[in-house]
Image: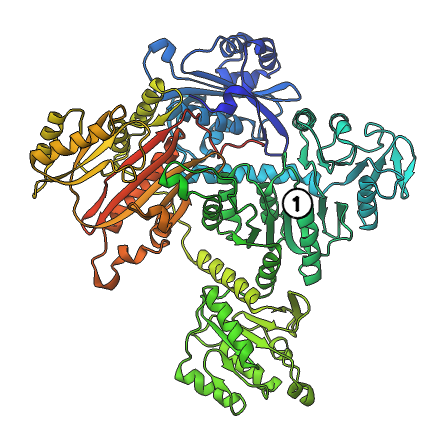
Amino acid sequence: MTDDLLDRAPVHALLADGTTVCIRPVLPGDREQLRGFYEEMSPENLRRRFFSASRRSGALAADRACAPARPGYRALLAEVDGRVIGLAEYDTGRERDGGQKDGAEVSIAVADGLHHRGVGTLLVEHLASAARAEGITTFTADALSENHEVLRLFADLGLRTSRRFEGPEVRCTVHLDQDDTYLSAVEARGRSADVASLLPLLRPSVVAVVGAGRTPGSVGRAVLHQLRTGGFTGRLFAVNPKVTSVLGVPSHPSVAALPKRPDLVVVAVPAAAVPAVAEESGRAGARALVVVTAGLDHTQAQALLTACRTYGMRLVGPNCLGISHTDPELSLDATFAAGHPRPGTAGVAVQSGGVGIALLDGLSRLGIGVSSFASLGDKYDVSGNDMLQWWESDGRTELALLHLESFGNPRAFSRTARRVTRRIPVLTVDAGRTDAGRKAAASHTAAAATRTMTRGALFTQAGITATRSVGELLETAALFHSQPLPEGSRVAIVTNAGGAGVLAADACAEAGLALPPFTPATVEELLAVLPDGAAVGNPVDATAAVSEEQLTACVDRLTRCSGIDAVVVALVPTAVAAATGDDLVRALTGGPGRRPRPVLAVRLEQDLPVRLLPAADGGTVPSYAEPQAAARALAHAAERAAWLARPAGAVPALDDVETGRARAVVEEFLGTHPDGGWLDPRTCADLMACYSIPQIPWAWAETEDEAVLAADRLRGFDGRVVMKAHWPGLLHKSQQRAVHLDLRGDSQVRAAFRDLETRFAGLLTGVVLQPLAARGTELFAGVVQDEVFGPLVLFGLGGTATEVLADHAARLAPLTDRDVHELITSPRCAPLLLGANGSTPVDLGELEQLLLRLSRMAADLPQLAEVDFNPVLATPGGVTVLDARLRLLPRRPHDPYLRRLR
């Protein structure tokens, strides 16, 4: 099997300079083009490829690449504008030598003048992905020792490489293991290419607006107005064949008629005209499109995307608000929002234009401002992943805000976000949380894997701060922008009105924050600076008599208290303060320098949900109208600080894993069950054994006598066994009363078998017998292969009540050691595993191994649709799966980390 995109359709990807290149399999009809590719090579390039400058070598290579498909051979070419610029191929020699091979000879050729642009590297990445899917583990290549370009290509791939010198030649061996080192190298190359491709979009020198007319209410005219009044520093043109000028901007009849080649074309024409405008823009040399038009049908959408790929244009939209970049040297505002965004430090990417307007307004009002903004709309091309990489590299963005309703490649997004969010906070609104339309699920695992849990796993693992509304997003952004992160979740509350302090305390407790008691020394210090009658608990009731000076001293002491991580000051206006002329807010903002811990204000009379109050030190202090908003924002800040403090985690290497045998088991089952299905007990056990997943001993029986003999072999020290019915499609045995427990002696075994045979006549295909397991904690572990997010590993309390109690946690595979630790400690049942109330902890090392092996199995086998281990028995002596169900579907491998455009 091979990657579906490589087999069925061309793939578009980015070269190092941002150029779009098409990578596709070589076809028999490419022979003449490939011969021309080699004929145009210089003698030196030919010599380095074939070890001789013979033109005949090139012709033979073209013939070989275009020959009919054969086992163990694959050739991919790279082309730009229909011209072949590179070729890569591997050959295992299977056709010549027979048998399955795990190694292949690889060769690469790149056209003259196109070296050092990443053509060969990109081809090898795609070729290696296809080879892995075929079970190939190594590439070997012979090169001249003077061919530094190809030697550097192999060395810089990020894969483990060895060299052996043989006279003037070098034999390179490249191991294709897709480890974190390789993925990080691919990411680095992808990030550089991605940012380069976005330059014409986000830093254009020449912009044209197609569809800007004389009608005041037209979208194209509104975009042109924003560009003109926003102070765009580059050249600006309108495209309208009926006028020569729009809003004082020169207008031309077509994109082709423009006096300068446009970097960016904004398209605001009816849907039917969009494909033709895109085609014309590409022919005119445009490098980016923003399509604000909505309502494209499938044919129009496909034609738009085809034009963008053919001519190497990056695309935002369609159905979008537009883009902006507030750098004063550029001042690009290509949107139809009502006002211009305030320049600042927040990067914003949204799918909904309405949400985009709300965020632009909110960030401008708060004074945070925007570095760059993209309304992604229907997200045909440019995505949140692209924008994260832009903000990571632009040197201006300090805060990233996302509102994404869908994810094209969640696993690639997760890796990017994990890296970016260690440098800048990434915040999102968790849109689309509900599962109102979700159908009833078959297994415990599928029932537990809700959309909320899946998205939550993505955000948690990536370190993304997920909020539940646009308002909460802005409230949290205000805190992240203005205050240092807390070192923990311990909060001190200070108030000048007891009731406000109680409200703040309740809000903090509900948000998961702690209000620790103060030490005696701290109590003494606070009493010394506060007015008589102050109550120095937590909250601190400073009373209405507190002065600005006293409140300042109190807050200063608390922010330097080692047992406190943040201070919330809840204030209400009083006649006492008004009479004395004290401004209690100034106690928070008027200090000589920035306080070492975050300080938040709660002002119940405040007219806006959140404000940023200017401070004397040049910074700001966030002020909230509701204590719940302050507590939520502070909880998010504490979670981010905890995430940053944790090590990044790594995917551990596992012993005793037979991936090749597992794939053979899967292929054999799907060969006889082409539509997939639930595995029978034997196949299920075989697949688990490939990953050394511990199973309780068991035996299969199809007759009463076989059941008796099996029970005799399996009986433990007290002679008791368990009998479970089996037939294809049986999932919930306990609900069907298809299990007999605690069977002693042959007579009880025979009676149990007869009962199952009678009640399930016509269904029963056999029974599974197991020794009665020892006492322990019953857990649940499983996998659901999500079509978009990939494999999701779930863990929690097991047994017959697993769905009722819903005590589960989830993480996306592949799991790191950190992910596994969090999976085990997140459910409410975690204290049972860790030794609550003086009990002996279960074998946590074996439990971690079980989850890691389950994750590896799911990552290795895309055909694994569901896994349901319930119960998993955990004891101090080990971990054992007592009941397992696995379902396979005929799915093709898909490499989520392969560099390609959407």
Q: Is 901 or 353 nearer to us in this picture?
A: 353
Q: Residue at the location (45% across, 44% down)?
A: 450
Helix, strand or loop at disc 1?
A: loop
Residue 466 x %, y %: 53, 53
Q: Where 854 sits versus 166, above or below?
A: below
Q: Where 763 sits versus 802, above or below?
A: above
Residue 809 x %, y %: 39, 49
Give the residue type that dot 1 points to: Ser
Please state if 80 lies on the left or on the right of 711 as rendered: right
Residue 502 x %, y %: 51, 76
Please state if 626 lies on the left or on the right of 825 as rendered: right
Q: Residue beneath label 1, please?
A: 352
Q: Quick check: can you spot residue 87?
A: no
Residue 536 x %, y %: 47, 84
Q: Where 681 sits versus 543, above or below?
A: above
Q: Where 335 sits versus 570, above or below?
A: above
Q: Is 861 or 670 nearer to us in this picture?
A: 670
Q: Total label count?
A: 1
Q: Is 806 or 202 nearer to us in this picture?
A: 806
Q: Residue furthest bottom?
A: 532
Q: Quick check: can you spot residue 20?
A: yes
Name the colouring of the figure. Answer: rainbow
Dot 1 surroundings within 10 Å: few (below 14), some, or many (20 or more)?
some
